[in-house]
Image (cartoon, rainbow, N blue to C red):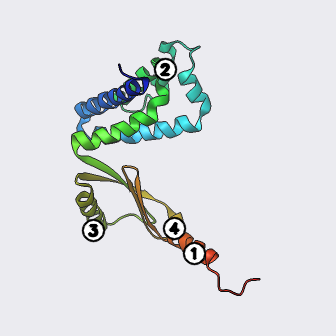
Amino acid sequence: MPTNRQILKEKVATYASVLLDGAYEAGGQDAVLEVRDQAERIMRIARSNMDLSDALEDSSYTPEQRGQLVRNLFAECNPVLVDVLAVMAERGDFALLSRVWASYGEQLERKLNVTVVDVTTVVELDDHLREVIITKAEADLGTNVVLREHIDKSLLGGILMSANGKRIDASVLSQLESARNVLKLTSDGGEC
C-alpha cells in the first residue's frame, strides 16, 4: 500500500508533468522555459508574502475562490501555468509549488534533454564567452544547455554558475572572502 510520502511525490510529479507537457504543446521549448522562469518568480512572491500564501491555502475560502484568486493574480503569466496553479490552489496544494518547480526542472532535463544554467557576471557576456560556457556546460552535463544570464555588480569580477542545485562560484568576491577567512585563521606566532 502506498504511503503518504509516495502519494505526495506522485502528485508533485503529476503537476510538473502536466505543466511541462502543456507548455511544450502550447509553445515548444520557449514556452517551457518561460513557464519555468514565471513559476520561479511566483515562488519568490509567495515566499515573501505570507498573506498571499495563507489565502491560497486557507480552507475558509472555497476552492473556487482560491482558484479565482490565482487566476486574477497571475493573469499575465502563461495560461498553462495559471491553470495548473489554480488547480493546485483549489485542491489546497499550493504549498507544493517549490517541489513542483524542482520536479519540473528534473523532467525538463529528462524529457527534453535541456538543462538551464544560471550565469551571473558583472558585465554582459559576449558571444564568444557565451559559446565557451555553453560548450563546456554541455560537455559536463551531457545535455543541451540554455543559459539564463544575470548581471550582479557586487561580484566585482569573475563568474557564478548554477544548475541542478550545484553551484560554481569563481567570483572575485568569493575569492576575497576566502582569502580573508584564511588570513583570520593564520597565526604568525606573535599574538599574546
Q: Amino acid at mark 4?
A: Ser
Report helix, strand or loop for mark 2. Answer: loop
* C-alpha separation, residue under disc 1 versus residue under disc 3: 35 Å
Q: Quadrant of the N terminus?
A: top left
Q: How many marks?
A: 4
Q: Position of residue 5 (x, y in %)?
A: 42, 27
Residue hosting label 2: 92
Q: Is residue 32 above or below residue 186?
A: above
Residue hosting label 1: 182
* C-alpha separation, residue under disc 3 versus residue under disc 2: 47 Å
* C-alpha separation, residue under disc 1 versus residue under disc 2: 49 Å
* Viewer-side label of 3, 2: 2
* Viewer-side label of 1, 2: 1
Which tag, 1 or 4, sits closer to the chain's start? Answer: 4
Observer able to see residue 35: no
Residue hosting label 3: 128
Q: Are marks 3 and 4 in contact (CB under 8 Å)?
A: no
* C-alpha separation, residue under disc 1 versus residue under disc 4: 12 Å
Residue hosting label 4: 174
Q: Are marks 3 and 2 in contact (CB under 8 Å)?
A: no
Q: Position of residue 135 (x, y in %)?
A: 24, 62
